[in-house]
Image: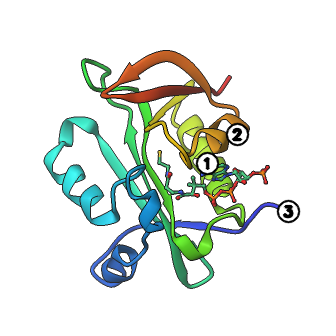
Amino acid sequence: MTAQIRLVEVTDENRDAVLAVRVRPDQQRFVASVEKSFLDAEREPEGKPWYRAVYAGDEPVGFVMLSWNLVPGPGLLGPFYLWRLLIGARHQGRGYGTAILDEVVALIRADGAEELFTSYVPGEGCPEPFYLGYGFLPTGDIEDGEIVLKLDLH
Ligand SMILES: CC(C)(COP(=O)(O)OP(=O)(O)OC[C@H]1O[C@@H](n2cnc3c(N)ncnc32)[C@H](O)[C@@H]1OP(=O)(O)O)[C@@H](O)C(=O)NCCC(=O)NCCS
């Protein structure tokens, strides 16, 4: 069964609860925090950041950030790029990550996307099996030491 999640805008009301969503300490080398994501979004408008908190019921369980329809160029993968995806340590392994990808894919498809890029830091415990399991394939490129993957949306 597909896990039930909702993508929710971050506001003054829920910001602190969303900032409290954290991965396990040993996973911090694979993904930046929610706090760092907010800073990146502010500092890198050319990355066309779009982000949402991820809720299961009334509880924030994760965070997702995309580059939404940018003009690809040096250091800018796209037009659509899964920039950040994280599920809180206590909530992993319940299908939430997969449900977020389903939701994001539906949203960007509706906006004309034909492919979704992402990239990951390789290493023990990295999310490679998660992405390959979903259908992403390596493009053969490496950006800033990260392995680039692409999901074909045709
Ligand atoms: C990677 C992540 C987003 C996956 O979310 P999740 O809700 O735990 O994943 P799901 O429950 O939807 O798992 C789907 C499948 O991927 C597998 N999977 C998930 N994370 C995995 C990992 N790190 N290594 C190996 N397999 C993994 C699950 O076992 C499951 O396999 P199955 O379908 O055979 O049962 C989440 O674990 C996470 O936030 N990890 C730490 C941060 C991170 O690495 N983010 C990605 C940055 S690029």
Quarter of image, res 130: top right
Q: How far apart are marks 1 and 2 (CA)?
A: 8 Å
Residue displayed at 64% across by 27% down = 153
The mark closer to the camera, 3 or 2, is 2
| SS for callout 1 | helix
Q: How crowded is mark 2: few (under 14 residues within 10 Å), some or many (20 or more)?
A: some
Q: How crowded is mark 3: few (under 14 residues within 10 Å), some or many (20 or more)?
A: few
Residue type at numbered disc 1: Leu
8 is higher (above) or lower (below) than 17 = above
Q: State the mark number for residue 1.
A: 3
Front-lying residue, 133 or 117: 133
Front-lying residue, 120 or 113: 120
28 is higher (above) or lower (below) than 151 = below
Front-lying residue, 83 or 119: 119
Location of mark 2 (residue): 134
Location of mark 1 (residue): 101
Residue 56 placed where, x, y %?
Answer: 62, 76
Residue type at numbered disc 3: Met
Q: Is mark 2 within 8 Å of ligand 1?
A: yes
Q: Does the residue labelled 1 lie within 8 Å of ligand 1?
A: yes
The mark closer to the camera, 1 or 2, is 2
Q: Does the residue labelled 3 lie within 8 Å of ligand 1?
A: no
Q: Distance between the residues labelled 3 and 1?
A: 15 Å
Residue type at numbered disc 2: Tyr
Q: Residue furthest top?
A: 140
